[in-house]
Each structure stands twice: as structure tokens, then as C-alpha cells.
Amino acid sequence: MLETTKRRQVVSRRKSGKMSKALAMMGLAMVALAAGSNSAWADLRLCNKTESKVGVAIGYKDKEGWVTEGWWNIGSNSCETLFPGALVSRYYYIYAVDYDQLGEWGGRAFMCTRDKEFTIRGIEDCVARGYERTGFFEIDTGEQSSWTVQLTEPVQQGTGGR
């Protein structure tokens, strides 16, 4: 019997007073969950564990090169499948915007986006091609067939145990 492993990655949002495309610092934690051999479970999913509505863009490399796609609008405390079926790449890249609190989840992997729904081929010369240059954070799926990313509120300093 083949056993698949589904992983979940938790990412905290950077609070920001404005919608900048600057680098975002984030905490990452991975939790492995055992799954049965059900191939329908093979997806890249994103769960919004905040009280805000978020917009999500994804970047990945397929047989023809780099692709960025967006936007998925995900309500508070809900999940969405971003890439259905078995994952075709080890690395995926995510950029997300908190519409209500004006924060973002981003990183150092720069790719092309735009304000409206998009599918963009290539990550070079974004601005010259009429797109925005946006910093995505990297997800290393370790070549698993399924992966779940969880966007969370930032951890407040001064709370918790000793």
C-alpha cells in the first residue's frame, strides 16, 4: 500500500500600515500529517487562518518555464485549492495580501503580478512588460504530492509562556 504524506506550512503575516511590496519577515513551521493512499488528496491548498479576507497569487515552474497566477480571494478561516492534483514542482511561491488589515505575506523571490486576475508567463522584466515586480515566499514541498500552507496572524510579543 502506497502512503502519501500531506504537509502543512504555517506562515505569519507582516503587519504594515501600507501595501508595500517590500520584503516580509515571516515565521515558518512545518507539521507533517499522515494521509491514506487516496490520490484525490493530492493538492496544493492554502488556508487563511486570519479574521481577514486575503488575496493570493502563486508562482511555479512548469515544463514551459515560470508562471504566476492570481488572484484567489479567500475568506477568513477558510481554505482553497490553488493547484489541484499531484504537484508538478518541488518549489512553489506564494504572495498574499490582507485586504482588511493591509498586511502582506511576501519574500525575496521576485515574480510578475498585476492588480486584476492574471496568468503571466516568465518572471523577467516585469515592469518593462507592464506588470508589477512582487516578492513571493518560497514553499519547499520536498517533492510531496500534497501540501497545505496556512496563513496566520503575526505572533504578538510579550504573550505566551516563559
Image: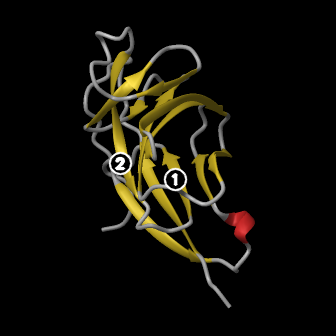
Q: Could you tell me if the residues under marks 1 and 2 are in contact, i.e. CB atoms within 8 Å?
A: no
Position of 80 relative to 114 (above/below):
below
- Helix, strand or loop status at disc 1: strand
Circle 2 is placed at which residue position? 138
Q: Quadrant of the N terminus?
A: bottom right
Q: Nearer the viewer, residue 91 or 15?
A: 91
Q: Which residue occupies 74% across, 74% down?
A: 38
Circle 1 is placed at which residue position? 149
Q: Which residue occupies 35% across, 11% down?
A: 129
Position of 25 relative to 56 (above/below):
below
Position of 140 relative to 157 (above/below):
below
Q: Which residue occupies 62% across, 31% down?
A: 72
Q: CA distance from mark 1 to mark 2?
A: 11 Å
Q: Which residue occupies 34% across, 25% down?
A: 134
Q: Nearer the viewer, residue 106 or 112?
A: 112
Amino acid carrying label 2: it is Glu
Determine if residue 18 is in view.
Answer: no
Q: Residue furthest bottom?
A: 1
Q: Quadrant of the C terminus?
A: bottom left
The type of colouring in the image is: secondary structure
Amino acid carrying label 1: it is Val
Q: Is residue 37 left or right of residue 157?
A: right
Question: What percent of the width, then of the height, locates residue 25?
Answer: 27, 41
Q: Is residue 31 left or right of residue 5?
A: left
Q: Is residue 131 left or right of residue 37?
A: left
- Helix, strand or loop status at disc 2: strand
The crowd level at tag 1 (other Cα within 10 Å; few <14, some 14-19, many 20+) is: many
Closer to viewer: mark 1 or mark 2 = 2
Question: What percent of the width, then of the height, locates residue 27?
Answer: 33, 52
Q: Nearer the viewer, residue 107 or 66?
A: 66
Question: What percent of the width, then of the height, locates residue 114?
Answer: 46, 16
The crowd level at tag 2 (other Cα within 10 Å; few <14, some 14-19, many 20+) is: some
